[in-house]
Image (cartoon, rainbow, N blue to C red):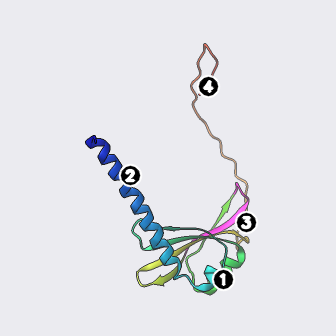
Amino acid sequence: MNEELLKKANFSIKTRVDWLQQAITAQILANFLPEKVQDLKITGIDLSSDGTKLYVDISGQDAFETLKELGATGFKPHYSGWTKDWYFTDGTLDLVPGYTAVFKVYHTDKPPRCHIETKTHTITEEVAVCEDTGNEF
């Protein structure tokens, strides 16, 4: 087999094995989430590149309240103008020594002391125009 092709194949295999190991580690860490969290609507789980953080996407105001009751801290409010939805990021909860769950909670109520303002921004861009066709790109 061509040496360069063999290198590429080995890299591809190593990458897939690494992904599988990360998925298994994330699954193991998810078992350390409090039972109340495991019962909530979890929409995504991922592992940080250093393997010390379990990123958990979760949905709903009830989930947000449950996480706060369990001691999750550090939440930062955000608003998506695209979906017209409030969400919170960076909430953390220690799982086991050396491992932390980091939560992003979608579809929450508007936080106190927050409101929506409409802002208009002017954008100037350059486009290429071809005189013979009139096409812009």
- Distance from the alpha carbon under mark 3 to that under mark 4: 39 Å
> Which of the two residues, 46 or 71, is positioned nearer the viewer here?
46
- Distance from the alpha carbon under mark 4 to that under mark 1: 52 Å
Tell me, yes or no, whether the two marked residues, 2 and 3, touch with CB atoms within 8 Å: no
Camera-side mark, 4 or 2: 2
Q: Is residue 63 within the magenta segment? A: no
Which residue is labeled 1 in the image? 66
Which residue is labeled 2 in the image? 12
Camera-side mark, 3 or 4: 4
Which residue is labeled 4 in the image? 136
- Give the side of residue 31 with respect to residue 52, left or right: right
The reply to whether residue 57 is in sight is yes
Which residue is labeled 3 in the image? 115
The reply to whether residue 112 is in sight is no
Q: Residue at x 42, y 84 (%)?
A: 97
- Give the side of residue 48 with respect to residue 82, left or right: left
As shown in the figure, which amino acid type bears the numbered disc 3? His
Badge 2: residue crowd in 10 Å (few <14, some 14–19, many ≥20): few
Read off the magenta span.
81-91
- Give the side of residue 70 with respect to residue 116, left or right: left
As shown in the figure, which amino acid type bears the numbered disc 2? Ser
Q: Residue at x 44, y 67 (%)?
A: 22
